[in-house]
Amino acid sequence: MIPPARRPVSSLSILLAGILLAACSAAGTGPSNPPASTALPSATPVPTLAPSTVAPSVPVPSPSAAPGLGNVDRTFPELAVEVADDYLVTLTDPAARAWRVDVRGTGPRAGDRLELFVEVGDVAPGAEARIYEDGRLVDVIDMSGMIGVPTAAAGGCHPTLGVCVGTGAITLDPGTGRLTVLVETLVDESVEVTGATADWPAEPFILGPWRMTESFRAN
């Protein structure tokens, strides 16, 4: 039996086969494609900061006019003077039945002074404002029965020192022995403030010796 004749293989077929074989080989040995979705690197964690601790603000008291104590040993009477536009004078003595506040000039005006006298009375306090010039009493202003009475007013000013006092600016508390006086100032004049108190050691309305405070220099 004669075998069938072989079909000749063309060179074009051999070339195509070689190309296909090379493509398959390259496909099998090449690196695999990365997956479509790639995981992103995790974000760096941000440290949680503790809330800052701030000390609560402590209110600082505003400065005020410092009182001038007329007696440093804390015995009575006590004098305190607060200096602002005017002079707020406080004279304290629990045993007192009478109070006296002197506002005196300095230097050439040392003989000029305004003296306020207040004494406990049967019904209302008795009060006088006494004006001295060059050491001489030149005027007395009677304010008896008018302290603490809103419908009554009396008072006066010293002609050279420019200090004034009136019933509306006087407060007396006999229970605590405290007299408070607002001395108004009209001019910038240097003055000294002194306090004194007295009681009734023997019988009512008979004053014993006056107890003095130290002087407070204003301006």
Image: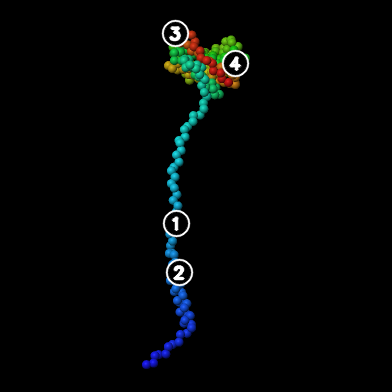
Residue 183 figure quarter: top right
- Please tell me how crowded label 2 is: few (under 14), some (14-19), or many (20+) other residues with Cα within 10 Å: few
Residue visible at 45% across and 52% down? Answer: 44
Split into 4 quadrants, where in the image is the N terminus? bottom left
Residue 68 at x, y = what percent? 52, 20
Which amino acid, mark 3? Pro
Which amino acid, mark 4? Thr
Judging by the rendered image, the residue that carries numbered circle 3 is 201
Residue mark closest to the camera, 1 vs 4 = 1
Please name whichever residue, 186 or 168, is drawn nearer the observer in this view of the structure: 186
Disc nearer the start of the sequence (2/4): 2
Residue visible at 58% across and 10% down? Answer: 136
Judging by the rendered image, the residue that carries numbered circle 2 is 30
Judging by the rendered image, the residue that carries numbered circle 4 is 106
Q: Secondary structure at mark 4?
A: loop
Residue 88 at x, y = what percent? 52, 21
Q: Secondary structure at mark 1?
A: loop
Give the vertical position of 73 relative to 61 (above or below).
Answer: above
Residue 114 at x, y = what percent? 56, 15
Q: Secondary structure at mark 2?
A: loop
Q: Total of numbered circles in the picture?
A: 4
Please name whichever residue, 38 or 136, is drawn nearer the observer in this view of the structure: 38
Residue 202 visible in image = yes
Q: CA distance from mark 1 to mark 4?
A: 89 Å
Q: Secondary structure at mark 3?
A: loop
Disc nearer the start of the sequence (2/3): 2
Disc nearer the start of the sequence (1/2): 2
> Which residue ends up furthest to the left in the rendered image?
1
Instruction: Point out which mark residue 41 bears.
Output: 1
Residue 149 visible in image = no
